Amino acid sequence: MQPQYIGASTIVLEVLWRFWPVWVALFIVMGASFLYKKKLALYGQLFDSGVGMTGVFICLFWLFTAIFASTISPFDPLGQIPIMKDTLPGAIEPQSGLVYLFGGDKLARDVFSRMVYGSQIVLIIAPAATGFALMVGITLGLPAGYYGGKIDSILSFLANLVLAFPVILLFYLLVTPGIMDTPIPYGLAGVFFLFPIIFFCVLFWTRYKNRPDRIYILLGLTLVIGGWIYLGLVFDRDPLHIVHIDPNQLNIFVAVVFASSPGVFRIVRGLTMDIKTRDYVAAAQTRGESPWYIMLWEILPNARGPLIVDACLRIGYTTILLGTLGYFGLGLAPESPDWGTAIKDASRLLRSFIHPALPPTIALMSFVLGLNLLADSLREQSMKD
Amino acid sequence: MLSFIIRRIGTILLTMLCLTLVVFFLVNLEPNLKKLAISQTEMHTSAEQLESWLVNHGYRQNFFVRYGQWLGIMPKQPITDPATGTTTQRFSFCNDPVVPTFSGVIEGDFGCSTKFKTTVAAKLFPALGATGILMLCVLGVMVPVSLLIGILAGMREGSRTDRVLSVASIASTATPEYVSGVIFTVIFASWLGWLNGSAASASQGITFYNFTLPVITLAIYGIGYIARMTRASMVEVMTQQYIRTARLKGLSFRSVVVKHALRNALIAPFTVIMLQFPWLLTGVVIVEVMFRYQGFGYTLVEAAGNNDIDLLLGCSLVSVFIVLITQLISDVGYAFLNPRIRVQ
């Protein structure tokens, strides 16, 4: 029995209709941002240029797609309906009457639903990994740039060591099924996830150490929340069973943080070396502020512009890295709907069917493009000041 | 200058030593050795047989002893039969010695590939040659195109050409190789049928038909980045006083760009192009796997997938060397091109 098909224009309309929660959310957020852009500082200035607005639009589109994935996608991303194997776009599934909008892949899964669910994986791992890489890079880059000397030489040597590794070799060594039997990923995770806790503790301590009413609350909160997440992520021993991460996802996460934190380190180090010669740093030194206070409360806020731009670019780069991992079949489960794995599966069969290959490639490309446009426009805006 | 280069080469050697030690540690993790033993012995071997294979082939010696053997500062041991005391070669397909010999990287012996059943040198160097041809073609496309785009965009900042080219280069940096490879294959191989979607036949002879897709796929990711750097440098040069002077002197815009601006604007992109090599290395792996081209990247993936210890170490040595040496060339070349910079 052959499935029935709907026409090309109906497919387009149906796809647009499927995304309705995204359009509503986009309309509200973009409209509100546009109306109040004068009050929104740097974010508001993005709405002054076409490039910036396009960037925000694409990024928000994928963000809302990830949030509303279960509403948007008509089918289960892992569900197989044998009759729909290798069907072309627009095939109607006879049981439910719903449509395989972008066709079915070789395992008879809905390409559209897989693309939509793939955004969830990317939008959780990429920003989170970038966040951790930023924390590690900042916590190590500030002292390296500020003190110089031995600390700088040792840390820079280590950073260059990691940077000299071709990324793909690093992934082949760090993200293998075998390595999860060894304590290495957990050890690395234990080290990396410690950095945010250290960072926030030092941040609050240097600022509020003479104000006991604040310091104990802030430090306590940091330690409780940080420790809770730490237990859940590294040891999988969350007492409340809320924070949980699969061992193979932890492995990917650690590898991505490991690969991108030396880049952040280098940027932060360079910025610190530049900013520490300014007058306000000299003033703080004369006031007798502690070195860490100067680093975290004088230098870091003044380095935020380039860091925000770099973070945007880095999320895009991390997305590409995740895709590379998926493309080589490293780490993620073979049936995982993420874009890299989907591209790998589809590209093997390009000779016979091309439709399963296009949605994930275009999705990945558009998301990275959105982030790059955003970064470009942020850079331009910060140059104006 | 000379002492600078010597110091840098010292750092490079130290880095290579550290990195190979890390790689050596990772490939010798217990699960990886098990994988190797299983792939090297017959089907359905018992755990004891796997263990005895590992012991026999010297994989159970002390970690540092084995690293020393690979490096060439410890003698490599042949297999000794405990009953008779006769010695046999470790791997017969590599002409391994039957008496303990110093034969490591320092002596020029890169070891033995367990996957391809030959010496690492016999596998790695032809692969590097093949990748070298690919790289040359890529650079031949990438450098002129990206410089041209960058110069055209940066010549008149803010013009329509500038905007269009800038967005195009941002788009190209947002397109990793596995995305552009798929899209190009769909367009040029599946729809139009102009080009071949596989470069497997390129090992016999390179033709426009089978080699174009890998080359443009690899080039496109780098083009955007280099073009943006060239544009930034061009924009900066065009605001300089000497450009205004040349214009006021009555020279045409064309000759100002070609004679005065271009030479100064091309210094920064030189560094960027050199530093692009590490990225190309990752791209090479993806493209060679995607288009089935038997080069360095393909070898690396095969080595990593089968935990071929010596071959993987050889691959990492080569890639780390390329990364570091291009950094050195870019630093030294920058000082030559821009006399205001003096290396200390």
Image: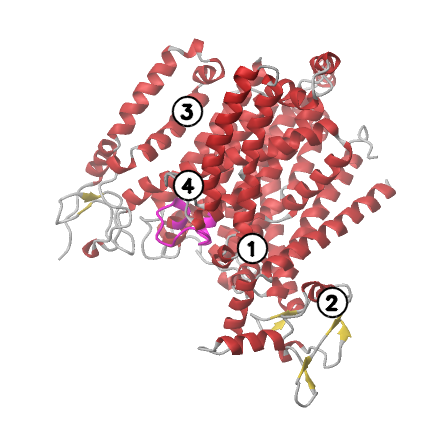
Outermost residue toward the bottom in this view: B84
Please give the range of residues in magenta: A324-341
Per the image, the residue denoted by label 3 is A56
Number of callouts: 4
The N terminus of chain A sits in image quarter: bottom left
Q: Nearer the viewer, residue A208 or A35?
A: A208
Task: Residue B142: name its quadrant.
Answer: top right
Q: CA distance from mark 4 to mark 3?
A: 35 Å
Q: Amino acid at mark 2?
A: Gly
Give percent across and percent down for residue B308. 58, 66
Question: Are discs 2 and 3 both within one chain?
Answer: no
Q: Amino acid at mark 4?
A: Asp
Q: Main secondary structure of the magenta part?
A: loop
Q: Can you tell which mark lies on residue A238?
A: 4
Question: Are discs 4 and 3 both within one chain?
Answer: yes
Closer to the N terminus: mark 1 or mark 4? 1
What chain does mark 2 sit on? B
Label 4 or label 3, whichever lies nearer to me, is 4
Per the image, the residue denoted by label 1 is A173
Residue name at image x 44 percent, y 30 percent: A370
